[in-house]
Image (tube, rainbow, N blue to C red):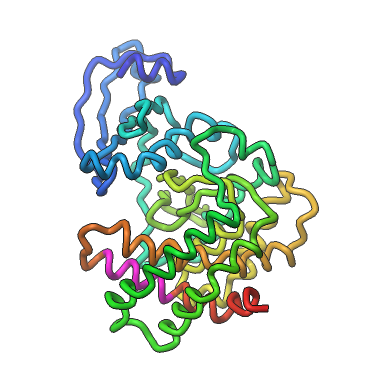
Amino acid sequence: MTAVLRHGGTDTEITGLRHEPVGSGQLSSSYRFHLTGAPDAAETAPPSVVLKLAAGTPAGRAQIAPGYRSEVGYYRSFATGAQIRVPRCWSAAITTDGHSFTLVLEDAHPSRPGSQVDGATLTQAHAAIRNLAGLHAPFWGQDGLRDTASWLRHSDEAALSFFGELFATATGPFIDRFGPDLSPSDLDTLHRTADLFGRWGRHIGGRHSLIHGDYRLDNLLFSKATDGVPPEVMAVDWQSLEVGFPGRDVAYFLSTALAPELRRSHEKALVRAYHDRLLEIGVPDYPFEACFHDYRLGILQAPLITVLGAVYATNTPTENSHRMFLSMITNACAAIRELGTLDLLAA
């Protein structure tokens, strides 16, 4: 551990450690390592770090290898150039075949992840959306992004057309599972989305940046807000990183994180907060009207990730995952209807 921390820029010496599991998903596991520094290095040694590793079956790890490459690649290639808050990374290593990786990250404790089921507070949403602008702005419109690395995915029209076919195929099984809990309006919205999804790529092909791809509450760590000071936000889980349409991240977050009533009342102010932060960092020639239009178009990211995640990426459904996907899809369908997203595609 001493060598890892020194290689990552912390001149310290670790004389003892103990660890405990802090999270285990289907494809990765995380452990908190409590560190003891040498007497003359106690002030430089972090009290703890988080170790994130590949997990699951060999077949599952091979299937998700592009995601592993994306997460390691973000910390290696982009984290220092972005202005989004993420855990500090001391080491990001991956095998040649991409089936195993190791990340040694800053321990954000006592910050806690958000909850898709509970939803975001307005304060959390404001902090998260400004944080997101710190990812998009530094890489805004950079054509060279596509050539940065072979592992970096790019959602062009052909790729989105492929995802549209997957979405259409998955909509039936999704409705079989969640349909009894969905309103007739939501069912109609899902069917119409599946019918029109193939047009989405033609509408969002122009503007691009580096996007997170899965910027939602469960992938954000929030500190506790105190005395009017907004919470700090850290974004984690970079396995869906790609070059794509920035409005997808914005709309996916706001449409799934906020209950319809809260989103309806505050979405313009929240999109404006995101837009203001883009301009602060230096994005040129992007009026707010264009930003809000991109937000309306980007909302199809929400049913895309929700439906594909529920049908293809959840091997063992649980009551909690059912509640999470149900909350995400009902919130997203309401936003799609209220913002006229499908009308934009049909025009």
Farthest residue, direction bottom: 184
* 328 magenta-colored: yes
Residue 257 visible in image: no
Q: Which residue lies at the image location 51% right of the left edge and 63% below the top edge? A: 301
Q: Quadrant of residue 186?
A: bottom left
Q: In this rendered view, identify the residue nearer to me: 194 or 245.
A: 194
Residue 263 coordinates in the image, percent (x, y): 53, 73
Main SS category, magenta section: helix
Tally of marks: 0
Rendered-image quadrant of the C terminus: bottom right
Q: Which residue lies at the image location 63% right of the left edge and 78% below the top edge? A: 346
* 136 magenta-colored: no
Rendered view: 5 above or below 80: above
Q: In this rendered view, identify the residue nearer to me: 53 or 61.
A: 61
Q: Quadrant of residue 34?
A: top left
Rendered view: 304 above or below 6: below
For the magenta stretch, what is the residue range? 321-330
Rendered view: 307 above or below 158: below
Q: Which residue lies at the image location 20% right of the left edge and 31% below the top edge? A: 19
Residue 329 visible in image: yes
Q: Is residue 149 left or right of residue 325?
A: right
Farthest residue, direction right: 285
Q: Quadrant of residue 275?
A: bottom right
Residue 160 coordinates in the image, percent (x, y): 54, 58
Rendered-image quadrant of the N terminus: top left
Residue 266 coordinates in the image, percent (x, y): 58, 72
Q: Which residue lies at the image location 40% right of the left edge and 28% below the top edge? A: 92
